[in-house]
Image (cartoon, grey):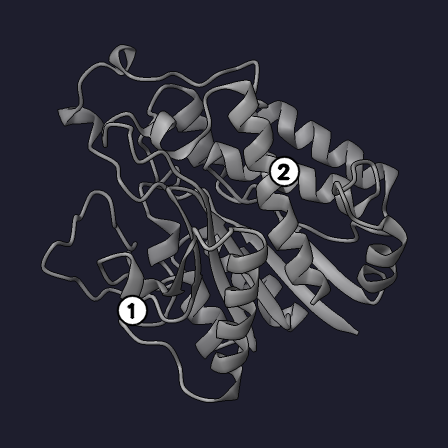
Amino acid sequence: MASLLFFFLFLVFAGFSPANAESNSTFTPINRDLYHSSVDLLEQLKALVHRHPDRLASFGQHGRELITSELAFRILSILSEEQFLPNTNPTSLNSILDKLVIKVVPLENLNGRKLVEGGDLCERRNGRGVDLNRNWSVDWGKKEEDYDPYEENHGTGPFSEPETQIMRKLALSFDPHIWVNVHSGMEALFMPYDHRNTTPDGLPSQRMKSLLNELNQVHCHKRCMIGSGGGSVGYLAHGTATDYMYDIVKVPMAFTFEIYGDPTASSKDCFKMFNPVDLSTFIISKSKSSRPIVSGMAL
């Protein structure tokens, strides 16, 4: 039986120190009519699991980018057949998904998300001030010339943070065949590596490239950036989850999906840059992003 682990990371890539920031009142606030609070989201997820223990056997807590947690909730609802993908035969999809073990981590960085909900709209780190996507062991601690010690604080050592310790334990016990790490900030489909500007060699790399090309054509209409994270975004990232999953856990297919970004937003208007702010875009983004992720499960 194939196994998959979908990791919903809410890490803001372009942030700023609150000490040097202008008042948040000049920027786009969280639309409370569109987004669950962290407390409500956890209650909704617990209720969903209670209703469908056979499908949603296990998932952890992840944190932070609001649109990605809303997407996680939608995907869990699709997997439990409380929502459906449009123009998809549910019987055919379920016959494939029934052969899989799927674990979804919708809200790991709860304390970081609460800081965002409290008004620190550009905060990307956990409650201890550590960037969880720099706290993994592959190439941990290396600093590029543009290293920002505030934004990219990698912690006191690999897995110094309880969130990454939990995720490592889950991954090593689960032995997933596919890993998807979901962010926002742009529209992109990335594969390893983040700490190099190249992709791995060999057949697994070719399979990842083939899948990303198919998803880009069918679901992104060729708009998504594809390739290695380190070779595509313009900077290298060290100590990331996806590189650990590929190099250490030996997940054959490890991905980072960027599901939304507003390139017109100011770099200081973080909520608008990383999240839809109106109902129409919010609905479209969740629907559009659900399809490639669920399709990736079924391929």
Q: Is residue 119 left or right of residue 77?
A: left
The percent coordinates of residue 32 (x first, y second) are 52, 15
Q: Name the residue under label 2.
A: 287
- The residue lying furthest to the bottom in this view is 202
Crowding at dot 2, Cα within 10 Å, few <14 / some 14-19 / many 20+, comes out as some
Q: Is residue 291 left or right of residue 151?
A: right
Q: In this view, does 200 lie to the left or right of 213?
A: left
- At 41% across and 86% down in the image, what residue appears? 201
> From what the image shows, is residue 186 above or below residue 120?
below
The percent coordinates of residue 298 (x first, y second) are 72, 63
User: Considering the numbered disc 2 on the image, is that residue within a helix, a strand or a loop?
Assistant: helix
Q: Name the residue under label 1.
A: 195
Earlier-in-chain disc, 2 versus 1: 1
The one nearer the camera, 46 or 161, is 46
Image quadrant where one finds the C terminus: bottom right
Q: Using the rendered view, name the quadrant where residue 143 is placed.
A: bottom left
